[in-house]
């Protein structure tokens, strides 16, 4: 297990290095700058002030020199200073990380709590009404744009039913979390339902399940002991992939619900060309994805001892 | 009450002047103390910074008006800047020296009284040669400010402390400092708090409300500053600014009574006006933004001919576009200065839609078969791609073939400043200072400053120079009107529209101003909520 962990962490290094280089180069060549972005609401910017800002932000230095500085600082955990707030990027990210994690975890919880049982039940009764209904629902869930779904949720649960607030972070409690979590969680929910169904159906037709049944094992024990455990590898893979990428997918939902997470920070930073903040956010998203997937790899070993990493 | 407010708002809408009455509160109704005002910051994303010196964005100044104060404020009722942090000002005969008697009861939120030193320190900070403070463009008009900006001096020679509550300001050129120092980026800040190093997360100002909490990307919470210098104000206990860039989300929240104000886009404007309840809480104003297609005379030869530029203005049915695409949430532009400008000439009429005349003018200019150009645009719904797509067939009808080139809004300013365009459609601030607004077409103004069309007209330059020198306000206004008329005739741009800013407000909210410099910028000390407000 420890060896797997060391190897996975080792693999992260080149991935992160590539991401750092890619983001840096990309945002150095795309048109527009933080200074010009300040005038995007029709207020002209003073050229002398723009020039001073360029110097203050180090944008007058050669690209290579900037990259060496940036990469060196990143290695020791210094993600630079935000152009917008003139504060360390690590401070900005630290302030947004918990709301983002909370939203991501809540969305994943929704997805797992509904998607996995739904897929299981559908697989145990293939062709039944519940199977058809859940799979139609899953396809719909996958194809629903998050923005539109979020608006629908706001409309019904806030405006019509008055059950929940339509937006905002509030005191960080559950009432403000429910709607954005559902809006974000529906897509992975649908995918999990379909994946679970496929995995369970696959295992149900396996020889060892037939053997277990022929030995007289109760259906309940067959399902809980043999089917569930063997189907879990695929389900865990899907959970890991979805969970890892969910933080990045939260951008739209966070903006819609005025949720103070990393997604909305990223969008604001992109539009205002706050390059250090953009780089910092993307780095966190990538890191989060890599960590989750490393944990998934470790989970495989725990779930199925037959799995070995050579 | 509601009817009165509606009538006032409707009157503003019909006349189309930002200087018209604010949302009226009858004399008989006494403002109620207490309660919470929930404003929205609708322009895109998070607040950039609570150190208001660092950001010129309209979004940030919404918070700025709550936490901070400037030497002047904008008086929407009178349509001019008004003294805010000074009781009186004496102006020298040549109009170059202003002596301000400052308020002696203005306290920062840390309890310290504001003095002349704070004015001098704040303006000197803005000119720091190592930092890019956007307010430098305004402070630069004070004598000696440029020396500080260049690092040649540490103090602005044109600022002199007479005593703790008297400061003398000597200008480098004759301008009305009211137009310069009502802008949020020139706010007066306390040195000792700024120098602590965490001013952005713990701002201290002179505003009517003091900082309580900022959840970036979500909300800013402020509470009443008991030592605010205006007797009896502010009325509300709290002002909360909710960051809500998504119009659709704002719409739901407003209808759900979770917010007290919402800036409306064209689609919502139509829906709200059609609603018998919501239409009663609409505040409209002709904001000082002119939307236009800027023609680059340096890159496209036909644009150098006035007749071609006039032909373009005649070829486009701007009225139809305003009606159908902008959903009447705009006023047809006449010339560069907006209708809310104090020197706007009400007798001027916009270019008539006349394709035949356009063809004739093109033929006279030597382009009977038209010509081609590339039209740079952002995706903006009110002054971007949808408008360009509607105009292209109209231009095509007179033989002009334009090709749209889409770029990000963030890139538009850079494109304009670099001159890397043939024509672009954009929205420009055109007020409230008409003189500096019109200077954007002076031949000595570089493109990087704002002469994006590379406009060069000797008569215009002369008129504007005379206006700059005029000491008589009436004479100056007359010259500015003349300059604006020259622009109309020269048509360096396609005059599209002036923004009609629309704010929806809840029936329990009072004291809003129809601020033509930016409707979202309200002076929160005047706002109050009656007992119908759902938030106590």
Image (cartoon, coloured by chain):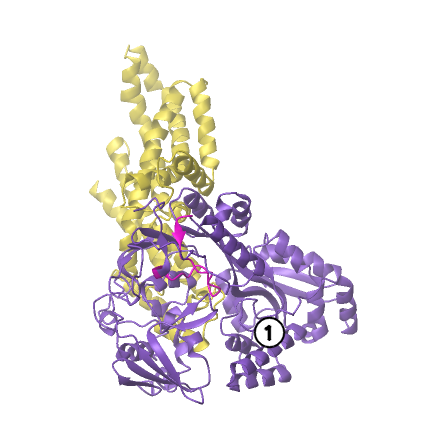
Chain colours: A yellow, B purple
- Whether B499 is drawn above or below A257: the answer is below
Looking at this view, name the residue that lies furthest to the bottom: B94
Q: Mark 1 lies on which chain?
A: B
Query: Is-magenta flag for residue B511?
Result: yes
Question: Which residue carries the number 1 mark?
Answer: B453
In the image, the segment drawn in magenta is B507-525
Residue at 32% x, 65% y: name it: A70
- Judged from the image, the secondary structure of the residue bearing numbered disc 1 is loop
Residue at 27% x, 76% y: name it: B118
| Residue A159 locus on image (x, y percent) | 41, 38
| Mark 1: few/some/many CA within 10 Å (<14, 14-19, 20+) | many
Residue at 48% x, 36% y: name it: A143
In which quarter of the view is residue B419 placed?
A: bottom right
Left-right relation of B192 to B95 = left
| Residue B49 locus on image (x, y percent) | 34, 63
| Residue A142 locus on image (x, y percent) | 45, 35
- Whether B106 is drawn above or below A277: the answer is below
- Labels in figure, total: 1
Look at the image and tell me in which quarter the C terminus of chain A lies: top left
Foreground of the two, A146 or B514 = B514
Asked whether residue B264 appears in the rendered view, the answer is: no
Left-right relation of A93 to A183 = left
| Residue B358 locus on image (x, y percent) | 75, 66
């Amino acid at each position: 297990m420890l060896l797997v962990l060391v190897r996975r962490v080792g693999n992260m290094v080149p991935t992160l290095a590539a991401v750092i280089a890619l983001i840096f180069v990309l945002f150095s060549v795309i048109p527009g700058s933080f200074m010009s972005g300040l005038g995007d609401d029709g207020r002209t910017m003073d050229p002398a002030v723009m020039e001073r800002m360029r110097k203050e932000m180090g944008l007058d230095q050669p690209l290579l020199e900037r990259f060496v500085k940036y990469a060196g600082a990143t290695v020791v955990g210094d993600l630079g200073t935000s152009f917008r707030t003139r504060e360390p990027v690590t401070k900005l990210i630290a302030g947004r990380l918990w709301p983002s994690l909370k939203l991501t975890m809540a969305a994943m919880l929704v997805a797992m709590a509904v998607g996995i049982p739904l897929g299981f039940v559908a697989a145990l009764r293939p062709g039944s009404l519940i199977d058809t209904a859940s799979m139609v629902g899953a396809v719909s869930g996958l194809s629903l744009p998050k923005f539109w779904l979020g608006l629908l949720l706001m409309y019904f649960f806030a405006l019509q039913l008055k059950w929940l607030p339509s937006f905002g972070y509030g005191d960080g409690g559950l009432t403000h979390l429910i709607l954005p979590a559902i809006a974000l969680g529906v897509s992975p929910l649908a995918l999990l339902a379909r994946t679970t169904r496929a995995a369970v159906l696959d295992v149900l037709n396996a020889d060892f399940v037939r053997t277990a049944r022929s030995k007289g094992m109760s259906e309940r024990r067959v399902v809980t002991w043999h089917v569930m455990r063997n189907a879990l590898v695929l389900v865990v893979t899907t959970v890991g992939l979805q969970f890892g990428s969910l933080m990045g997918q939260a951008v739209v939902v966070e903006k819609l619900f005025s949720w103070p997470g990393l997604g909305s920070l990223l969008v604001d930073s992109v539009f205002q060309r706050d390059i250090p903040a953009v780089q910092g956010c993307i780095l966190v998203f990538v890191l989060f994805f890599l960590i989750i997937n490393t944990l998934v790899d470790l989970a495989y070993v725990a779930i199925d001892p037959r799995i070995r990493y050579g | 009450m509601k009817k009165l407010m509606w009538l006032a708002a409707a009157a503003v809408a019909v006349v189309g002047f930002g200087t018209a009455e604010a949302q009226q509160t009858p004399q008989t109704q006494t403002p109620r103390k207490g309660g919470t005002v929930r404003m929205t910051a609708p322009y895109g994303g998070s607040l950039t910074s609570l150190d208001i010196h660092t950001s010129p964005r309209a979004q940030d100044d919404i918070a700025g008006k709550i936490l901070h104060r400037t030497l002047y404020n904008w008086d929407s009722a009178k349509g001019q800047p008004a003294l805010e942090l000074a009781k009186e000002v004496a102006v020298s005969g040549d109009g170059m020296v202003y002596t301000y008697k400052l308020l002696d009861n203005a306290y920062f939120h840390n309890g310290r009284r504001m003095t002349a030193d704070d004015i001098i320190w704040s303006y000197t900070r803005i000119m720091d040669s190592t930092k890019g403070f956007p307010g430098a463009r305004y402070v630069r008009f004070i004598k000696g400010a440029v020396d500080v900006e260049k690092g040649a001096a540490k103090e602005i020679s044109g600022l002199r402390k007479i005593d703790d509550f008297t400061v003398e300001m000597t200008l480098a050129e004759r301008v009305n400092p009211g137009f310069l120092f009502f802008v949020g980026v020139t706010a007066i800040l306390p040195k000792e708090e700024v120098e602590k190093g965490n001013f952005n997360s713990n701002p201290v100002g002179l505003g009517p409300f003091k900082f309580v909490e900022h959840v970036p990307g979500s909300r800013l919470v402020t509470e009443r500053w008991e030592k605010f210098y205006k007797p009896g104000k502010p009325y509300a206990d709290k002002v909360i600014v909710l960051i809500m860039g998504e119009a659709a989300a704002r719409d739901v929240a407003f209808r759900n009574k979770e917010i007290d104000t919402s800036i409306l886009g064209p689609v919502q404007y139509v829906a709200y006006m059609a609603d018998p309840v919501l239409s009663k809480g609409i505040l409209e104003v002709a904001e000082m933004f002119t939307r236009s297609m800027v023609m680059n005379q340096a890159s496209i030869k036909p644009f150098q001919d006035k007749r071609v530029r006039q032909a373009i203005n005649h070829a486009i049915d701007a009225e139809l576009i305003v009606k159908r695409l902008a959903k009447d949430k705009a006023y047809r532009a006449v010339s560069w200065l907006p209708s809310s400008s104090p020197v706007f000439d009400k007798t001027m009429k916009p270019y008539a839609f006349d394709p035949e005349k356009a063809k004739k003018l093109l033929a006279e200019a030597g382009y009977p078969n038209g010509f081609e150009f590339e039209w740079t645009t952002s995706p903006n719904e009110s002054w971007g791609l949808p408008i360009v797509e509607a105009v292209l067939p109209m231009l095509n009808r007179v033989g002009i073939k334009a090709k749209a080139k889409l770029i990000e809004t963030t890139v538009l300013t850079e494109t304009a400043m670099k001159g890397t365009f043939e024509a672009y459609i954009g929205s420009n601030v055109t007020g409230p200072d008409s003189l500096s607004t019109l200077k954007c077409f002076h031949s000595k103004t570089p493109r990087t400053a704002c002469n994006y069309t590379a406009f060069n007209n000797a008569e215009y330059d002369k008129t504007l120079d005379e206006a700059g020198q005029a000491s008589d306000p009436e004479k100056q206004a007359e010259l500015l009107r003349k300059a604006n008329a020259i622009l109309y005739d020269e048509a360096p741009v396609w005059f599209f529209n002036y923004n009609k800013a629309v704010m929806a407000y809840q029936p329990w909210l009072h004291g809003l101003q129809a601020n033509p410099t930016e409707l979202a910028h309200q002076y929160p000390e005047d706002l109050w909520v009656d007992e119908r407000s759902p938030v106590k």
